[in-house]
C-alpha cells in the first residue's frame, strides 16, 4: 500500500510539473509573439517524435552531415500552433520532461528533445539551417574537426562557461528565442551574453576553434553530469551556481596532482559533505600541496580522522559566516 501511495504521489507531482511547464510554454509563445515553433530533435538512441510527427515529414529538416562519427543526425521539426500540431508540440514538451526526470537517476538517459526555437517557418532559411549545422562543427586544438553537441540540454547551459565572448554571442544570436528543459524538468531560456560586440561576417562563417583549456572543459561535461547523478542532494542546486563549483573542484584537484576521474569525484564528494573550500583548511591543505608521495586523493587524506573532518566543517562554516 505504501509503495502504491508513493507511486501515485510521484505521478501526481510529475503531472503538476508538466502543467507548470505547459503554462511557461504558453506564456513564452505569447511574450515572443510566436505562431510556430521549431523543435530540435536528436534521434541518436530513439526518435521520440517519430510516431507523433507522422504526416509531418515535409516539416522536418535534417542537419546533415555534421560529422561522420555521428551515426544519426539531429533534425528540426517545424510545428504551427494550430490544434493538431499544438498537440504534437505539447507531446514534445511531455517527452522532454520525461527524459529529464529519468536522466536524474543513476544511469544516463538519452535526451532526444534538444530545445524549442521561436521563429517558425520564417526562420528556416537555407542560410540559417546551414549556420545551425556549422555550430555543431568545431576545430580541436590539434586542428582536427570534431562535433559539438550543443543541442543536448545537458551541454547547452554549460557552454556559457566554456565559449569565449564572441563564440557564445554567436550561439545566443543563432538560438534566441529558445527554451530548453533543465536537469529539474524546468523550462529555461539561454543565459544572456556577458559582453556583446559586433561580429564580423568572417567570424560568423568560421567554425569554432577551441583552445586546449576549452577542449579540456568540454571533455569534463560528461563527468559533471555523472557527478550530479551520483550526489543526489545537489539536484536542487541552481545550475549557474553548481556547475562553476564543479569546475572549480575539478581544476583544484588537478592542481594538486590528482588527475583520475575517481579523484575528482572524491574531491567533489568531500566538498559537498564538508565545505566547498575544504581543501584550504590547514589539516587538508598541507597533505595536498606537492610534492607528496600519494598516488590518489584518498591516500593523501587517509590519516584525517572523522573528528578532524567535523572540525574542518565547523571551522570553515564559522569562517564563512
Image (tube, rainbow, N blue to C red):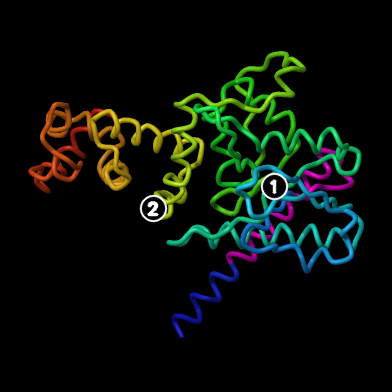
- Does residue 318 appear to the left or right of 153 in the view shown? left
Classify 167 as above or below 137: above
Specify few, some or many for label 1: CA neighbours under 10 Å numbering under 14, 14-19, or 20 or more: many
In which quadrant of the rendered view does residue 197 lie?
A: top right
Which residue is painted at 64% across and 20% down in the image?
A: 166
- Does residue 62 appear to the left or right of 193 in the view shown? right
Which residue is painted at 42% across and 50% down in the image?
A: 228
Classify 258 as above or below 222: above
Which of these two is toward me, 120 or 277?
A: 120
Identify the residue under disc 2: 233
Specify few, some or many for label 2: CA neighbours under 10 Å numbering under 14, 14-19, or 20 or more: few
Classify 22 as above or below 254: below
The percent coordinates of residue 15 (x first, y second) are 64, 66
The percent coordinates of residue 12 (x first, y second) are 60, 69
- Does residue 266 appear to the left or right of 76 in the view shown? left
The quadrant of the rendering that contains the C terminus is: top left
The percent coordinates of residue 225 (x first, y second) are 46, 48
Labelled pair 2, 1 in contact (Cβ < 8 Å)? no
In front: label 2 or label 1 = 1
Residue 11 in magenta? no
The part of the chain drawn in magenta is: 13-39
Amino acid at each position: 500500500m505504501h509503495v502504491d501511495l508513493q507511486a501515485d504521489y510521484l505521478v501526481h507531482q510529475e503531472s503538476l510539473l508538466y502543467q507548470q511547464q505547459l503554462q511557461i510554454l504558453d506564456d513564452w509563445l505569447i511574450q515572443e509573439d510566436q505562431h510556430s515553433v521549431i523543435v530540435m530533435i536528436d534521434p541518436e538512441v530513439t526518435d521520440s517524435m517519430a510516431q507523433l510527427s507522422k504526416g509531418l515529414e515535409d516539416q522536418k529538416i535534417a542537419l546533415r552531415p555534421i560529422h561522420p562519427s555521428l551515426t544519426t543526425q539531429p533534425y528540426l521539426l517545424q510545428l504551427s500552433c494550430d490544434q493538431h500540431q499544438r498537440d504534437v508540440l505539447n507531446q514534445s514538451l511531455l517527452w522532454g520532461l520525461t527524459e529529464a526526470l529519468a536522466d536524474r537517476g543513476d544511469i544516463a538517459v538519452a535526451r532526444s528533445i534538444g530545445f524549442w526555437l521561436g521563429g517558425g517557418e520564417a526562420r528556416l532559411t537555407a542560410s540559417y539551417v546551414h549556420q545551425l549545422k556549422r555550430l555543431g562543427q568545431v576545430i580541436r586544438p590539434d586542428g582536427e574537426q570534431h562535433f559539438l553537441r550543443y543541442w543536448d540540454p545537458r551541454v547547452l547551459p554549460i557552454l556559457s562557461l566554456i565559449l569565449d565572448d564572441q563564440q557564445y554571442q554567436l550561439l545566443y544570436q543563432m538560438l534566441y528565442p529558445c527554451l530548453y528543459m533543465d536537469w529539474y524538468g524546468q523550462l529555461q531560456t539561454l543565459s544572456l551574453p556577458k559582453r556583446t560586440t559586433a561580429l564580423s561576417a568572417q567570424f560568423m562563417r568560421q567554425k569554432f576553434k577551441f583552445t586546449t583549456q576549452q577542449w579540456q572543459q568540454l571533455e569534463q561535461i560528461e563527468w559533471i553530469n555523472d557527478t550530479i547523478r551520483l550526489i543526489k542532494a545537489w539536484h536542487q542546486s541552481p545550475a549557474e551556481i553548481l556547475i562553476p563549483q564543479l569546475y572549480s573542484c575539478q581544476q583544484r584537484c588537478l592542481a594538486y596532482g590528482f588527475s583520475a576521474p575517481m579523484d575528482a569525484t572524491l574531491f567533489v564528494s568531500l566538498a559537498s559533505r564538508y565545505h566547498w573550500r575544504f581543501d584550504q583548511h590547514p589539516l587538508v591543505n598541507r597533505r595536498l600541496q606537492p610534492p607528496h608521495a600519494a598516488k590518489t586523493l584518498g591516500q593523501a587524506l587517509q590519516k584525517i580522522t572523522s573528528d578532524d573532518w567535523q572540525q574542518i566543517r565547523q571551522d570553515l562554516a564559522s569562517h564563512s559566516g
